[in-house]
Amino acid sequence: MSNSAIIFRRTQFNRYSLPLLMGIVEKASKNIPIYLLDSIDSLVDFKKIYKRPILAYSFTTLQMMKVYEEIKEIKSRFNDVYFIAGGPHATADPEGTLALGFNTVFVGEGERTLTDFVDIIEKGGELPDGEIIEDKNEEPVNIDDYYPVCKRHNLCGPMEITRGCFYNCHFCQTPRLFRRTIRHRSIKSVIRGIEKAEHYNGQRLYFLSPNAFSYQSMRAGEINYEAIEELLKSVKDCGVKDLDIAYFPSEIRPECINDRTLDLLEKYCSNKKIAIGIQSGSKPVLKRTCRTSGIEIPLNAVALARSRGFTSHCDFIFGFPDETQEEVDESIEIMTLLIKKYDARIHCHFFMPLPMTPLWNSTPTHLSEKTKDTLNKMRDWGKLDGWWEEQEIESFNIIEWKKLGFIKV
């Protein structure tokens, strides 16, 4: 019986992060087996082969309690499974994550720390237990050196082109999770990633970025048009048939929508939809949450995009702390305008209090029945989507989990 393998627990919520994590392990070792786990029942088969399988989780705060319950079930059914965790929740609340039942928790960027962990396994060393591992290197990770590709499983994910965010929206974890210098993947590295992932050739390529048109910029509001065009042209010259940018899993800040950026989309990209974060139609809410784009800029951006033949998929968030019905109605009014005048679609969210964010200790505001009826009507029109109903429940669950001590920050 072999000693160990690294088994990544796959869910619908971490499918974009796993190719990179598995690629890190694959790069670090040619010998350590790597697997995907879609059902914990399959651990029966792994336990027949491996004395102590290593089960790896990457998850957000929303999935925390499901992960906790799953670990309890696994420990009741199987002996000697080693659990490791990483991802947004582990970074935001490492002590609490360790207490969920994990042996080791990885905080922040995992490229170097996961590589070191793999090296311990390969050399037959003793695995850490009850430890929180954080990259102490003062130099930021060079994202050029890592790709969302695991060739053993013919698995690849969206190509990350920018890590970190220049902005400071108070509901968002991204600027806090990546506290180091904002980094951009070089064009040479993008091309190398495409070559490594044969799946991309002749297929659709998606980029991963908090703001697709911040690529190679050095500050908020700056657009490096030349670098963006060089990137898009180089990718197309590689033989990528369909290229998507500024649509999920990336989006575009409304400040970055202008005729020149839309020209680049038309010239090089396949998507005729763009994802725009508007978040609220209420100026007081935007000010309280430090959403600096305001409301006029997004409205002008959607109007321009429509005039150029693009459909805008606009993010809105409800349930912000201290949000009044009047402020909610302002958002509804803007959404209605966007739908009727510009044929936009709305992607609706409910505010989530997330560790590390300035709004972590705030309480969400329940939606009124009036608001729910309006959102449901928009959904019936085929103009609204999203998981806002489920998120409202989960949002208050997070507060309860904190009270019960499952979240320790």
Image: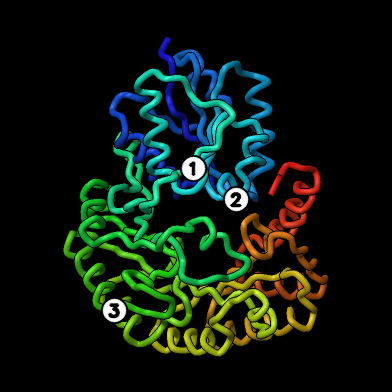
Q: Could you tell whether 224 is left or right of 221 in the image?
A: left
What amino acid type should be assigned to the residue bearing mark 1? Answer: Glu
Residue at (58% x, 77% y) in the render: 291
* Residue drawn at x 59%, y 48% as measured from the top left: 89
Reading the image, the residue beneath label 2 is 92
Nearer to me, 3 or 112? 112
Q: Nearer the viewer, mark 1 or mark 3?
A: 1
How far apart are the alpha carbons under marks 2 and 3?
A: 34 Å
Query: Residue 47: horizontal and vertical position, in percent?
Result: 51, 16
Query: What is the secondary structure assignment of the residue under circle 3?
Result: helix
The mark nearer the N terminus, 2 or 1, is 2
Q: CA distance from mark 1 to mark 3?
A: 36 Å
Which residue is found at the position 58% from the left and 70% from the top? 169
Q: Residues within 10 Å of mark 3 (few under 14, many from 20)?
A: some
Quarter of the rendering containing residue 358 = bottom right
- Is there CB contact under 8 Å for labels 2 and 3? no
Is any part of residue 377 visible from this angle? yes
Is 99 displayed left or right of 14 in the figure?
right
Please give left or right for residue 140 compared with residue 133 in the image: left
Disc number placed over residue 299 in the picture, else none: none
Give the mark, 2 or 3, whose residue is nearer the N terminus: 2
Residue type pointed to by label 2: Ala
Drawn side of residue 77 relative to residue 157, left or right: right
Q: Secondary structure at mark 2?
A: helix
| Helix, strand or loop status at disc 1 | strand
| Alpha carbon separation for disc pair 2 and 1 | 12 Å
Which residue position is annotated with label 1? 134
Asked where in the image residue 293 lies, by quadrant, the reply is bottom right
